[in-house]
Image (cartoon, rainbow, N blue to C red):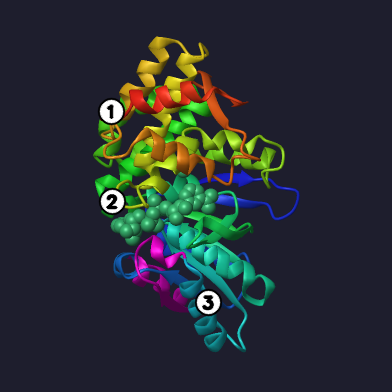
C-alpha cells in the first residue's frame, strides 16, 4: 500500500493507494477512532459491486454500518437529495457516533462530503473513491458541495476527509469512457506540473486504457502527489496557486454549461478546453508549435474528443462570462509555457479567444 500524506495546518490526512485493499478498509478505519457507526453513502451501481465487501470489512472490525443509496448521476448532487439523505441519517443515527463513508465517484464524494460537513455541524468522513477521476482528483483537497439550478457546485465548503482510501482494483469495472474522462485530468497534471508524467501517459496510454493495474497504480499515485502538493500550498484557494488546476477548465466549464451538461462528460469537455488553451498559448507565442501538437496528439491518442461539435463560438463566450471564476468580468486563463509549466494570465484579447475556440470546433 502506498501512502501519501496531505499536510495541512489543521486536519492533515493520508491517501492510501493499493490493490485489493478494500476488504481491509474496516480494520484500517478502526485505528482512526473516528466513530462507531459507518454511514456508507453510495449509488446502486457501485453498491452492487463493492457494498458487501465494505460492509463485511466494517463488521469484521467491530464497526456497525448502514448503507444509504442515492440515484446514480450528477442529479444526486442536489439540495433535495442531500437533505433527504440528512433526514434519513438523523433518524438512523440519533443515539450513535457516526462517521460517513463516501463510496463512489466524484458525485458521491462531493455529496457525501457535503452531508458530513453540515450534519451536526460536521462529522468525520472518509473518501473511498471508485472512479479514476475521483481517485486522482475529486477525493483529494476537501472541496465538497452540491449543485443549484443556477449552477454547478454553488453550495459547498472546504471540509477535509480523515482518510482517502483508493483501491485500484475498483477501476476494473469502470467503463472505458469514464477511464478516458479521468485521463483528461491526468494529462492536465502532466501539463501543469510534470513533463515526465506527461511522457509516461504518452508511452503507456494503451496499457492504461486496457486497465493495466500496475500502470494505473503508478499513475494514480503520481497524480495524487501533484494534487496534494497544490492543495498543501493553497488549501482554500486564496493564494492563486490552486488555480493552476483550472488549466483547460475555463473553456471546458463553458462547453459543459453551453451544452447543458448533456453532450460531454466533464473530462471530455476539459480535453476540448485543453486543446483550446494550448492553441491560445501558442497564439500568444508562449508555447511552441511542437509542444502544442504533443498536447493535442495525446488528447487524441487516449480517445478524447478531437473537436467541439454542435456548439457555436458565441455560445461558449456567453457561458464563459457566467463562470464564477471570472472575477469582475475580467477574463483569466491558465496558459502553458511548456509542458510542465503553466501561468495564470488575464486580460486576453477577445479575438484570440474566439480563434482558439474556432480552431477546435467542427463548424
Ligand atoms: N471536489 C472536487 O475537488 C472535484 C474535482 C473534480 C470533479 N468533481 C466532481 O466530481 C463529479 C464527477 O466525478 P466522476 O467523474 O467520478 O463522476 P461520477 O461520480 O458520476 O461517476 C461516473 C460514473 O461511473 C460510475 N462508477 C464509479 N465508479 C465505478 C466503478 N468502480 N465501476 C463501475 N462504475 C463506476 C458511477 O456510478 C457513474 O455512473 C462531478 O460532480 C464534479 O463536479 C469534484
Ligand atoms: Zn476537472
Is label 3 in a helix, a strand or a loop? helix
Q: What crowding class fits label 2: few (fewer than 14 Cα within 10 Å), some (14-19), or many (20 or more)?
A: some
Q: Nearer the viewer, residue 196 or 286?
A: 286
Mark 2, ligand 1, within 8 Å: the answer is yes
Q: Looking at the image, tell me whether mark 1 or mark 2 is earlier in sequence order.
A: 2
Q: Quadrant of residue 288?
A: top left
Q: Which residue is denoted by mark 3 in the rendering?
A: 83
Q: Which residue is denoted by mark 1 in the rendering?
A: 300
Q: Nearer the viewer, residue 1 or 267?
A: 267
Tags 1 and 2 touching, CB below 8 Å: no
Residue 70, percent across and down?
39, 72
Q: Nearer the viewer, residue 198 or 5?
A: 198
Image quarter in which the C terminus is found: top left
Is label 1 in a helix, a strand or a loop? helix
What residue is drawn where x is 50% and y is 67%? 101
Left or right of 25? Residue 154 is right
Q: Is residue 132 magenta?
A: no
Mark 3, ligand 1, within 8 Å: the answer is no
Q: Is residue 53 magenta?
A: yes
Q: Looking at the image, tell me whether mark 2 or mark 3 is earlier in sequence order.
A: 3
Q: Is residue 88 above or below residue 76?
A: below
Q: Which residues are magenta?
A: 50-77
Q: How far separated are the C-alphas under marks 1 and 2?
A: 23 Å
Foreground mark, 1 or 2, reads: 1
Residue 235, percent across and down?
68, 45
Amino acid at each position: 500500500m502506498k501512502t501519501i500524506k496531505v499536510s495541512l495546518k489543521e486536519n492533515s490526512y493520508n491517501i492510501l493507494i493499493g490493490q485489493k485493499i478494500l476488504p481491509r478498509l474496516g480494520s484500517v478505519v478502526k485505528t482512526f477512532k473516528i466513530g462507531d457507526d459507518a454511514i456508507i453513502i453510495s449509488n446502486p451501481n457501485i453498491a452492487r459491486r463493492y457494498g458487501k465487501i465494505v460492509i463485511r470489512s466494517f463488521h469484521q472490525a467491530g464497526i456497525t454500518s448502514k448503507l444509504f443509496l442515492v440515484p446514480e448521476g450528477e442529479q444526486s448532487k442536489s439540495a433535495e437529495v442531500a437533505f433527504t439523505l440528512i433526514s434519513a441519517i438523523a433518524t438512523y443515527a440519533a443515539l450513535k457516533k457516526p462517521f460517513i463513508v463516501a463510496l463512489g465517484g466524484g458525485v458521491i464524494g462531493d455529496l457525501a462530503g457535503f452531508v458530513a460537513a453540515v450534519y451536526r455541524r460536521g462529522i468525520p468522513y472518509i473518501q473511498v473513491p471508485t472512479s479514476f477521476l475521483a481517485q486522482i482528483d475529486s477525493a483529494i483537497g476537501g472541496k465538497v458541495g452540491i449543485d443549484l439550478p443556477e449552477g454547478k457546485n454553488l453550495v459547498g465548503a472546504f471540509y477535509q476527509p480523515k482518510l482517502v482510501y483508493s483501491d485500484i482494483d475498483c477501476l476494473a469495472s469502470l467503463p472505458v469512457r469514464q477511464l478516458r474522462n479521468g485521463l483528461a485530468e491526468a494529462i492536465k497534471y502532466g501539463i501543469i506540473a510534470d513533463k515526465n508524467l506527461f511522457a509516461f501517459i504518452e508511452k503507456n496510454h494503451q496499457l492504461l486504457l486496457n486497465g493495466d493495474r500496475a500502470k494505473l497504480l503508478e499513475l494514480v499515485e503520481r497524480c495524487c502527489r501533484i494534487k496534494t502538493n497544490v492543495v498543501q500550498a493553497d488549501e482554500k484557494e486564496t493564494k492563486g496557486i490552486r488555480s493552476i488546476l483550472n488549466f483547460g477548465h475555463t473553456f471546458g466549464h463553458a462547453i459543459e454549461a453551453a451544452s447543458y451538461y448533456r453532450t460531454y462528460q466533464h473530462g471530455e469537455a476539459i480535453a476540448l478546453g485543453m486543446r483550446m488553451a494550448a492553441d491560445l498559448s501558442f497564439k500568444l507565442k508562449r508555447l511552441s508549435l511542437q509542444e502544442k501538437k504533443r498536447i493535442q496528439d495525446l488528447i487524441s491518442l487516449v480517445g478524447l474528443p478531437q473537436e467541439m461539435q454542435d456548439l457555436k463560438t458565441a455560445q461558449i463566450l456567453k457561458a464563459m462570462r457566467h463562470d464564477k471564476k471570472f472575477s469582475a468580468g475580467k477574463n483569466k486563463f491558465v496558459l502553458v509555457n511548456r509542458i510542465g509549466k503553466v501561468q495564470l494570465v488575464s486580460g486576453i484579447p477577445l479575438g484570440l479567444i474566439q480563434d482558439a475556440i474556432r480552431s477546435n470546433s467542427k463548424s
